[in-house]
Image (cartoon, helix red, strand yellow):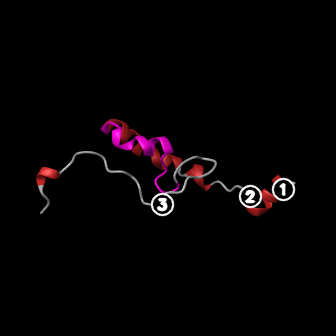
Amino acid sequence: MKDEIWRREEIESPCVKICVVHPDARLCTGCLRSIDEITRWSKMSREERRSIIDTLPDRKPLLSKRRGGRAARLARDV
């Protein structure tokens, strides 16, 4: 049984320990938060955290768009 004294009522971090920032979307590919959101997370109010958590599913498509791979990089460098 957990010690009730240490129980907290805050929203947990959505971090999944995959910390890679997408170069175009500027979002973490693991938790979908921006660098600013990650930095400020511990200082945010419960309401602000909840608001961000609610928007995370809508951000997923920003990371799945294909960028063209090697062929696009080669064409861009020409």
Where 22 falls versus 45 (above or below)? below
Contact between marks 2 and 1 (CB within 8 A): the answer is: yes
Tell us which disc is closer to us: 2 or 1.
Answer: 1
Tell us which disc is closer to us: 3 or 2.
Answer: 3
Residue extent of the magenta highlight: 29-46
Considering the numbered disc 3 on the image, is that residue within a helix, a strand or a loop? loop
How busy is the neighbourhood of tag 1: few (under 14 within 10 Å), some, or many (20 plus)? few
The amino acid marked with disc number 1 is Ala
> At 62% across and 50% down in the image, what residue appears?
23
The amino acid marked with disc number 2 is Gly
Q: Earlier in the sequence, mark 3 or mark 1?
A: 3
- Look at mark 2 in the image and give the residue it sits on: 68
The spot of residue 35 in percent (x, y) is 50, 45
> At 46% across and 47% down in the image, what residue appears?
56
- The answer to which quarter of the image holds residue 72 is bottom right
**Residue closest to the eye, 62 or 22:** 22
How busy is the neighbourhood of tag 3: few (under 14 within 10 Å), some, or many (20 plus)? few
Q: Answer left or right for 18 relative to 9.
A: right
| Residue 40 sits inside the magenta stretch | yes
The spot of residue 33 in percent (x, y) is 47, 47
The amino acid marked with disc number 3 is Ile
> At 43% across and 43% down in the image, what residue appears?
39
- Look at mark 3 in the image and give the residue it sits on: 18
The spot of residue 46 in percent (x, y) is 30, 39
> At 84% across and 56% down in the image, what residue appears?
75
Question: Which quarter of the rendering shows the N terminus?
Answer: bottom left
Task: Name the mark on residue 75.
Answer: 1
